[in-house]
Amino acid sequence: MKKIKYLYTSLLMMAIAALCLLDFTDLSHKMPTVSSLDKFIHGGMYFVLSALLIWEYRGRKKIFPGRDLEASIYADTGHMYRLFWAVLLICAVFGGLLEYLQGLTGYRSMEQADLTADVLGGLFAYLIYYVTALSVQSKTDKQA
């Protein structure tokens, strides 16, 4: 059986789509209102989505012979740029598509602030990865 590329990321994207398109109007009246809570939820969902994408990408990365795992993962900076653009595009396009679809429903609304929170959540996950990568690369260079 062939292994599916980015299986967990794809499953999470489907779950996010379902959550964003479900009708929660009956439930929302029972929940306490917290200012901008939905923006934090959007950012958190896309943070987790991007972190999972990065994790799956790292798992697919080939390890260079003669180098330890951490050094080989971070040795090629080209993958960091590809990953940055992948995270940015997935968050912007997927988030934008879901916001557009929410605008088409009669019970959800399309908001630019939600899309901004989606992209910022994804970029925050990438920023953590990038800082970690630099730290690991620095430690590896000092040991060599």
Image: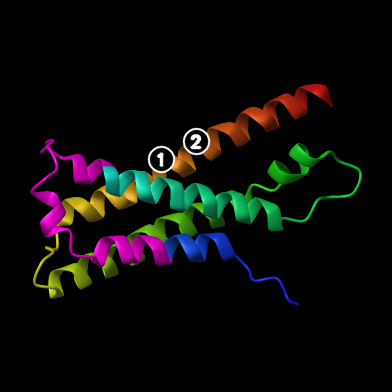
Q: On the rendered image, what quadrant is the N terminus found in?
A: bottom right
Q: Position of residue 73 (x, y in %)?
A: 72, 45
Q: Quadrant of residue 71?
A: top right
Give coordinates of residue 102: x percent, y percent.
18, 68
> Circle 2 — which element?
helix
Provide residue 57's location: percent of width, then percent of height.
62, 56
The residue beneath circle 2 is 128
**In the rendered image, the vertical position of residue 36 relative to residue 136, given as above or below:** below
Quarter of image, res 68: top right
Report how far apart the C-alphas of labels 1 and 2 lie in the structure. Answer: 6 Å
125 or 48, nearer to the observer? 48
The residues colored magenta run 14-40
Where, quadrant-wise, is the C terminus in this rendering?
top right
Q: In this view of the protein, which residue sits in the foreground, 24 or 91?
A: 24
- Contact between marks 1 and 2 (CB within 8 A): the answer is yes
The answer to whether 14 appears left or right of 35 in the picture is: right
Colour scheme in the image?
rainbow
The amino acid beneath tag 2 is Ile
State the SS at label 1: helix
Q: Which mark is residue 83?
A: none
- Residue under circle 1? 124
